Image: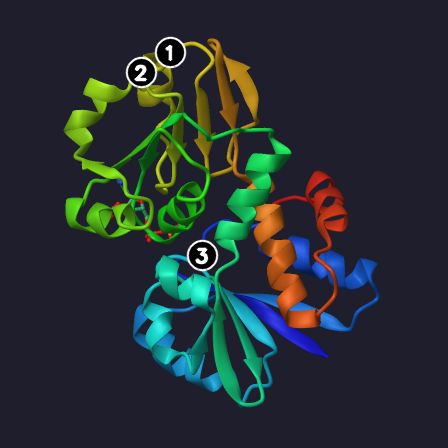
Amino acid sequence: MFVTGIIGYPLKQTYSPLLHNTTFNALKINGIYYPMRVQPTDFGTIITSLKTLGFTGVNITNPYKKKVIKYLDAIDTRARSIGAVNTILIEKEKIIGFNTDFYGFEKSLLEHNIRIKNRTVLLIGAGGVSSACAYVLKDLQPRQVFIANRTIYKAKMAARLCEADVIGFEQIKKIIGFVDMVINATSVDLQNVIIPALKENCIYYDTNYWFKSMKRRGIFVVNGLSMLIHQAALSFSIWTRHKPPVAIMKVALKGGAKC
Ligand code: ATR
């Protein structure tokens, strides 16, 4: 049996149990995915107990994507470069870390037909999700990337991944009118402050998914559902060796409520 789940805190709303449990059922694979709200003081104990508890693997979410690295026996090279792990696999008594957020972001750009080449991009945020986006941007030949974050030293670390220019939040207004794409990789809603300042045909890509993708005031507003599905599908594949079940997960999301 595949025993999986997601560990985070406070783990408010997540579609992941719906996506994975629906997929186990649809594929008739004997498996289960648990949401696990783990307090920061218990995090280390829980991670090191996963082996004895018989887990196949888990997803790691806020605020643990960087913190988990010190508990791993091995880490995938891409996850190491990004500096964040959102998927772990327990194999032969070893805890192995992966990053599937970068894959989710890359696939979602293709799915939405978003081209980065020669475009000026503003990436807001400098956590694990932002680093995964920066890792993808580096290979897509943007004209220029700016990274803005509330805590500036974290932005410097993310900027190294894609040779970006770091700016403070207060400098966003100086560049916002000429960028071709904004990526919100923070956990806060920035739509109302950012979208009115964007030029026409700009893309506002939000890694969150509490709103619908749409065209708003001449701006293409894209949510993070495609990224969510593709990252989940790759995690599922890492645990079960089944090919990423993207189509099943898309259907699961259409029919389900948040859990
Ligand atoms: P994730 O792994 O999902 O990226 P994270 O590592 O906790 O999560 O990063 C969250 C991001 O949202 C960070 O860029 C964080 O900014 P700080 O680095 O300054 O903490 C950003 N963020 C969270 N709450 C914010 C707020 N109220 N205003 C601005 N940025 C915020």
The answer to which image quadrant residue 172 occupies is: top left
Decide if residue 160 is on the left or right side of residue 188.
left
Decide if residue 23 is on the left or right side of residue 138.
right
Distance, label 3 to label 2, CA atoms, is 36 Å
| Position of residue 152 measured from the top left corner of the image (x, y, whole percent) | 16, 44
**Label 3 CB less than 8 angstroms from ligand 1:** no
Q: Tell me which amino acid carries mark 3.
A: Leu
| Position of residue 211 measured from the top left corner of the image (x, y, whole percent) | 52, 29
Q: Going from the N terminus, do you reach mark 3 or mark 2 first?
A: 3
The answer to which image quadrant residue 149 occupies is: top left
User: Which residue is identified by label 3?
Assistant: 11
What residue sits 72% from the left and 71% below the top?
31
User: Which residue is identified by label 1?
Assistant: 199
| Position of residue 15 measured from the top left corner of the image (x, y, whole percent) | 59, 50
Say whether residue 85 is visible: no
In the image, residue 223 above or below residue 26: above
Distance, label 1 to label 2, CA atoms, is 7 Å
The answer to the question of whether label 3 and label 1 lie on touching residues, with beta carbons closer than 8 A, is no
Q: Between residues 2 and 78, which one lies in front from this camera angle?
A: 78
Q: Residues within 10 Å of mark 2 (few under 14, many from 20)?
A: some
Question: For numbered disc 3, what is the local secondary structure?
Answer: loop
Give residue 52's mark: none
Q: Nearer the viewer, mark 3 or mark 1?
A: 1
User: Which residue is identified by label 2?
Assistant: 178
Q: Going from the N terminus, do you reach mark 3 or mark 1 first?
A: 3
Q: Residues within 10 Å of mark 3 (few under 14, many from 20)?
A: some
Q: Tell me which amino acid carries mark 1.
A: Lys
